[in-house]
Amino acid sequence: MGNKDPGLATDVLPQPSHVRRGPTGAREQRPIWTIVRVDFDWLEEKEEQAFNAWYDNRHVPEVCGFAGSRRAWRLKLEPDDGDLGPRGQKYMAVYETDYPDYLPKVRRGTVPWDGIWGDHIRNWEMGFYRKLYDHEEQEGTHA
């Protein structure tokens, strides 16, 4: 099985999407992005402010404090006047990690949302994604 052509230069073939060559030529695993999307039903604005403080100052540092974490982002949906269909959840967090089960592993054995915010959660989902294409990687870094 496989191509036995002695003239085929296998080292110049495109690498699988989850593997790339690093600066030294070594193969590197592409990171996984864990994306968490959620809505809440806050009764008061101060509850939302308390959640944001907890998330930024406790949850993210705890989750990202282990080997295998690269970086994290928090995003909040912005209103717009366009008619592009459903908007999705209000909050989204993106965790860039070395493997797909990073977030479930570091949170295993803990109470979800530290047992504080669970009653307010609506429409929660999590997915694991691997980057397939990066324009800047293909074209070089843009200033």
Image: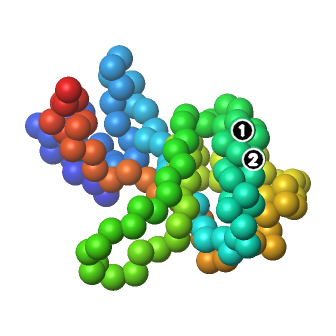
- Picture residue at 47% right of the left edge, 74% below the top: 88
Instruction: Point out which mark residue 67 bears.
Output: none
Toward the viewer: 51 or 133? Answer: 51
Mark 2: few/some/many CA within 10 Å (<14, 14-19, 20+) = some
Contact? badges 2 and 1 (CB < 8 Å):
yes
Task: Name which residue type carries label 1.
Answer: Asn
The residue that mark 2 highlights is: 54
Quarter of the rendering containing residue 113: bottom right
How many marks on residues?
Answer: 2
- Left or right relative to 6: residue 71: right
- Residue 124: x and y, percent? 63, 72
The residue that mark 1 highlights is: 57
- Residue 111: x and y, percent? 87, 59
Task: Name which residue type carries label 2.
Answer: Trp
Q: Is residue 58 visible?
A: yes
The answer to whether residue 117 is above or below residue 94 is below
- Picture residue at 61% right of the left edge, 37% below the top: 69
- Residue 116: x and y, percent? 85, 60
Quadrant for the C terminus, please. Answer: top left
**Residue most extreme to the top:** 24
Secondary structure at badge 2 equals helix
Alpha carbon distance from label 2 to label 1: 5 Å
